[in-house]
Amino acid sequence: MKDASRYSVHPNIRILFVAFSNSIHTVRWINQIKSMGWSLHLFPADFYPSAHPGFEHVMIHSVAEDKGLFDNQENSSAGSAFEDKNDFKQKLKRSRFFQLRPMKKLISVLSSIRFKWWWRCELRKRAARLTDLIKELRPDIVHSLGMQHAGYMTQMAKKNMQQDFPLWIATNWGADIHYFGNIPEHAAKIRDVLESCDYYSCETQRDVPLARKFGFKGKILPVLPNTGGFDFVRVDHLRTPGPISDRRVILLKGPQGWVYRGLVGLNALALCADVLKGYTIAIYLAAPEVAEAATALSRKIGFPVEIIPYCSHEEMLAWHGKARLSIGLAMSDGISTSFLEAIVMGSFPVQSNTGGAGDWIVDGETGILVPPEDTEAVAKAIRRALTDDELVNRAAVINKKTVRERLDYEKVQSEVIAMYKSILQHAD
């Protein structure tokens, strides 16, 4: 076994992350190990990469061979090459002919086909660039964050190299296996990744047997939240003081389509109109159809509905901190960061039963788990949360104890650092 002290502060230890470069989740994960003195590198897995300003001590590489590094201090304009700036084309798309429904549908289909073709070609080129980067850097660890972009790309790079590939950690994000594993085209690729990587990590116990089912035979790493823990000293002041039952905001996660079901939540709220008096319904990440339906609902029931624009992480925490109830519905998910934010800030969660929320709450006591497409079941949960003061107050006390024990930033950070040290110490 190697000397453990070597891995405490040693710049010759190199870790290459393959992940979304403009994701706060990537930032929060990598920044947990920034103090170790290791050489940290990131190869973007985004469609249109740009560097998030939150990275510290991370070298972000370009996806193109003839480009240098992204500037870590400012957002990169790497995606600008993909933007269509032809005024004539834009005017043509806005013309009356192209606004006809059959033409709009045809354009949508053709655009989807064109995009899939472009991304397959781009993925091959980026995998080749990643292969060259791995040969050049010779990292001790390659860590892919997310399966469908980073994992597939890393698998292609490993096939390109054929031998001398570094230790590979494949991390599952959200619905990566639970949802995409049911799609034949993706199932085959997921199996390729999990049969090739050395370590697997995820944020919910549900995905551990799923990884084994897809052929993973390596070491399962500790189940940890993909966004790290919370600094409670920093976030506690964002909570509205007083009992949770005194709060008069209902928070709804508003995406719609793919796996998200914001409209189900909105329709369930409409069924509870008789108990909504005095409340404001606030919707974040609202899809256009959800925002439109919310406006109509507000006119119909006469209660205020607020669409929350894009905001900072602290502002989002503050919304959960003044909410009595936080609703999140999806056909598949991991833990759901918004769910964790809700229980950290004291809001009572009504969460779909298709993610990892069951690892954190007791259904019916510290939150309510619901089928994501069952409007009546969601409405029943909402009604209970709005009429049972003792339920939401008691749940907040229990959930506060849970998150203090399991989600403290320094605790999660130490577990993450210990994970990497263990892998390095057992490397050949």
Image (tube, grey):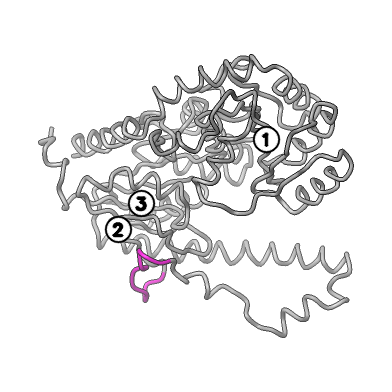
The amino acid pointed to by label 1 is Val
Give the residue at mark 1: 249
Mark 3 or 2, nearer chain start:
3
> Residue 17, which numbered label?
3
Give the residue at mark 2: 134
Q: Quadrant of residue 221?
A: top left
Horizontal side of residue 106 vs 220, given as left or right: right
The amino acid pointed to by label 3 is Phe
Q: How crowded is the residue under tag 2: few (<14 C-alpha within 10 Å), some, or many (20+)?
A: many
Secondary structure under tag 3 reads strand
**Residue 237, image x, y percentages:** 46, 36
Horizontal side of residue 375 vs 165, given as left or right: right
**Residue 189, image x, y percentages:** 52, 46
Q: Quadrant of residue 43?
A: bottom left
Mark 3 or 1, nearer chain start:
3
Secondary structure under tag 1 reads strand
Find the residue positioned furthest to the front.
242
